[in-house]
Image: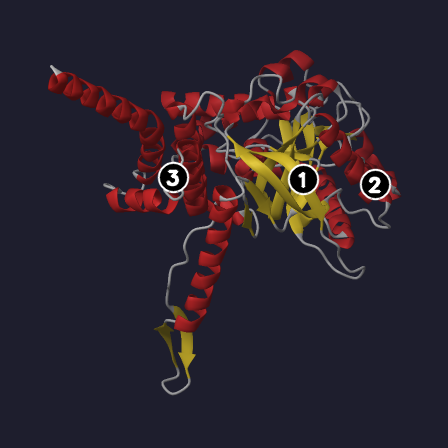
Amino acid sequence: MESYREIVALLLAAATAFFYLLWFFVPPVRLVWRCLSTRENLPVLNTLKACCDSAWPFHPAMFRRQMRLWLELRLLHPKPRQEPKWFLDPRSKRYQLQYDDRAFRHELAEWKRSTRAKFGALKIKEKEPVIEVVDVFRLNDDGTKEGIKQYLLALSQLRLSLDEQAFFLSSVKIEHGFLLPLNLLPGLMSRFADDWDPIISCYDRMANRAFSPQQMTILNLWLLWGASVPICSCDQWGGPVTLQYGFGDENNSVRVRVRDERKEQLLAELRKAVAGRSGGAHPALHASITGRLWPPSSFFQGEICGAQQELLNPDREAFILEYEGHSVIGNPASSRLFYTAYVWALFVVGREQKPGGDQVRQEPWLHVIPFFEQGNIVDDSCYEMAKLQLVLKVINFVKSSGHLEADPGLAPLRLWYVCALDDSGCGRDNEVVPKGKTIRSTLEELLAESEQRPLKKRIITDDRSYAQVLSGCHLARVVSELFEAIAEGGRRG
C-alpha cells in the first residue's frame, strides 16, 4: 500500500511538473518557433539557441521576456554577417572580392557586447532595454517589416499572459530622422506591390469615364508613391494622431502615434521651431525618437483620429510606433538638411460649368487633378524652388491645354483649387502653420502679374465648394475608396 501511494504521489508530482512546464515553458518556445519558421523550414537549432541564450538565470516569467528580447534583437539588431566587398587590385587593375577579417571581428565584438548588455539589463535589473537603430531603413526593410508583423501577430494569438498586449517588449530608438506634422497617404506601389494587374486592367475604363486620359494619368502618377497631407486643427484630427518620422524621403517613414499632453507638447515644439527659423522650410524637427512598436489591430476606433482611420487596417500597416520621447539633433547654422517629399496642390477640373458637389462626391477621382514636384522640403531655398516650379507647372498646363484636346471645339478647361501640402483646404489652419508663402499664395501672386491675368478666370483659388469632400482631412478616405474601385475593376477585368 505504501509503495502504491508513493507511485501515485510521484505520478501526481510528475503531472504537476509537466503541466507547470507546459504552461510556463511552451508558449515562448512556440513563439520563437513560429517566428523563425517563416524563414526556416525546420528551425530546431535556432530555437534551441534562443532557449540557451535565455535560460539563465531561469525564472518562468523572466524566461518569456528573454525569449521575446531574443526575437526582437534578431529582427532589429541581427548578428553581423561576414560578406566580401569589392576592391581594386592595383596589380591586376581589376576589381576583386575580398573579406575584411579585421573589420568583421571588430563589428562582431561590438554586437556581442551590445547584446550582452541588453540581456543583462533584462536579467539582472529586470529593465526592458532600448534597441537602437540608425534610421528607419532597418524598420522598413521588407524582410524586417514582415518579421515584425509576424512577431506581433504571434504575440497576440499565443496570449503569453493575461496582462500582456501585442507590442514590442523593448523600446526602439531611431537615431536619425525628421519628425513632421504630416500624414502619408498609402501609394499604389504599397497597395498593389505584388500585382499591378488591377491598376492596368481598370485604367482604360476609368480613363474613358474621367475628365480626360491626361487627368487620370496624372492622378495615378501622384498616387504611385503616395503624398503627404498636413495635420489640421479641425475635428477630423481630434484625439490621438500619427505624425510622420522619416529619413531621406517621406516614403522612408514610419507612423508615430501621439496622444493627450504628449501630442500637444510635440505640436507646440514644432510651432516653436517654425517661429525660430528665419526661412520658410516645411515644419520639421531633426531628431532621434524613441517608442514601442504596436500592431494597428491593437487600437480601437477612437484611438486614432477620424482622418487616419485607415491606419487601423493591419493589411495596410505592419506596425505603428507609440511615441515615448525624442531628442532634437542640433545642426550648425550653415548646415544643409535633406528630406524629400511631393510638393503638391490638388484641383477639381472642369469647363464652363463647375462640377457639382454630388457629382464629385460620388467618384471624386474622376474630377480631380493634382500637380506635384519632388522637392527637398527641409531646405529653405530648395523648398521655395519646388513651390515655384509647381505653380509654373499649373499655369503652363492651363495655357497649353488647348493643344491636348481631342475636340478643338470644347470649351477651355478650368481648375478649382482645393488643397495642398501646406494647406488642408477645409477652412481651418494647420496644427503647425508653415512660415513664408504658401503654395496657394504663390499661385495667386503669379496670376496677378499682367501676363498671367487672363488665366485668373480659369484657375480659381477662392472657392471652398469641395472642402467637405476633397480637403486634406478627407483624402485618406477618398484614396481608400479609389483603391477599392481599382481592385473591383481589376477583378471584373
Name the secondary structure under disc 2. Answer: helix
| Front residue (pair 463, 133) | 133
Name the amino acid, label 1. Answer: Gly
Residue 409 vertical placement versus 288 (above, below): above
Which residue lies at the image location 68% right of the left edge and 14% below the top edge? 357
Say few, some or many: other residues with alpha carbon within 10 Å of mark 3 (under 14 / 14 to 19 / 20 or more).
Answer: few
Q: Which mark is residue 274?
A: none
Which residue lies at the image location 77% right of the left edge and 49% below the top edge? 384
Circle 2 sits on which residue?
272
How many angstroms separate mark 2 from mark 1 (CA)? 17 Å
Circle 3 sits on which residue?
58
Please tell me whether mark 2 or mark 1 is closer to you in this view: 1
Name the secondary structure under disc 3. Answer: loop
Is residue 446 visible from the viewing direction of this image? no
Q: Position of residue 435 (x, y in %)?
A: 83, 42
State which tag comes first along the sequence, 3 or 2: 3
Relative placement, left or right, of 29 versus 281 is left
State which tag comes first along the sequence, 3 or 1: 3
| Front residue (pair 223, 380) | 380
Quarter of the image with the C terminus is: top left
| Front residue (pair 50, 325) | 50
Q: Position of residue 231 (x, y in %)?
A: 71, 30
Name the secondary structure under disc 1. Answer: strand
Residue 42 vertical placement versus 15 (above, below): below
Please tell me whether mark 3 or mark 1 is closer to you in this view: 3
Question: Which image quadrant is residue 448 in?
Answer: top right
Which residue lies at the image location 59% right of the left edge and 14% below the top edge? 362
Q: Which mark is residue 325?
A: 1
Name the amino acid, label 2. Answer: Lys
Q: Position of residue 430 (x, y in %)?
A: 77, 30
